[in-house]
Image: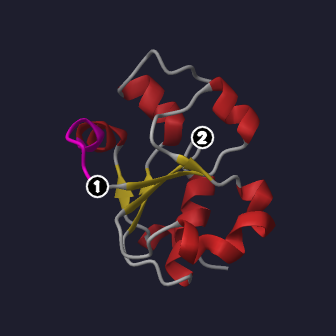
Amino acid sequence: MTNSFASIPEVSVESLSQRLAQGADLQLVDVREPEELAIASLTGFVNLPLSQFQQWSGEIQQTLDPHQETLVLCHHGMRSAQMCNWLLQQGFTNVKNIAGGIHAYAVKVDPSVPTY
């Protein structure tokens, strides 16, 4: 099996912070579990936990705009890369993985966000 994640565009947490501050028109998806969100979360993200994939996957074209810039977040960047890959397979045209996930955001951008 080849590593198909290498071709997924990434956005740094610093760039994410800057774009959020500028009010960029972004579609924000967090694929972490509800118990992870209870520890740390960022405003404006829609939660689509990967463990609940069966519940929301069939409605993805209605839930998200396949042509809007979509940034995907998880804890460290692996689950979000999986989600990016899947969204691209569903015809989404502008998907980016948030490099390093919420952990990197807490460390590099906003120390008030708890790490776990």
Q: How many discs appear?
A: 2
Residue 69 lies left or right of residue 88; in this view the side is left
Taking the spot 68% from the left edge, 28% from the top edge, the residue there is 38
Q: Which residue is mark 1?
A: 25
Which element is circle 1 on?
loop
> Please, what is the three-letter code of the amino acid marked with disc 1?
Asp
Q: Is residue 3 visible?
A: no
Indicate yes or no whether the magenta region holds residue 21.
Answer: yes
> Please, what is the three-letter code of the amino acid marked with disc 2?
His
> Which numbered disc covers residue 106?
none
Q: Which residues are magenta?
A: 19-25
Residue 61 x, y percent position in the rendering: 55, 76
Query: Which of the image's four quarters has the N terminus?
Result: bottom right
Which element is circle 2 on?
loop
**Nearest the camera: 55 or 17?**
55
Residue 35 x, y percent position in the rendering: 75, 33
Few, some or many residues within 10 Å of mark 1 (<14, 14–19, 20+): few
Residue 80 x, y percent position in the rendering: 56, 56
Taking the spot 35% from the left edge, 68% from the top edge, the residue there is 68
Quadrant of the image occupied by residue 116 = top right
Residue 48 lies left or right of residue 28; in this view the side is right
Q: How is the image coloured?
A: secondary structure
Q: Which residue is mark 2?
A: 75
Residue 105 x, y percent position in the rendering: 43, 32
Between the C-alphas of marks 1 and 2, the distance is: 23 Å
Quadrant of the image occupied by residue 15 = top left
Above or below 30: residue 37: above
Q: Is residue 106 visible?
A: yes
**Nearest the camera: 38 or 105?**
38
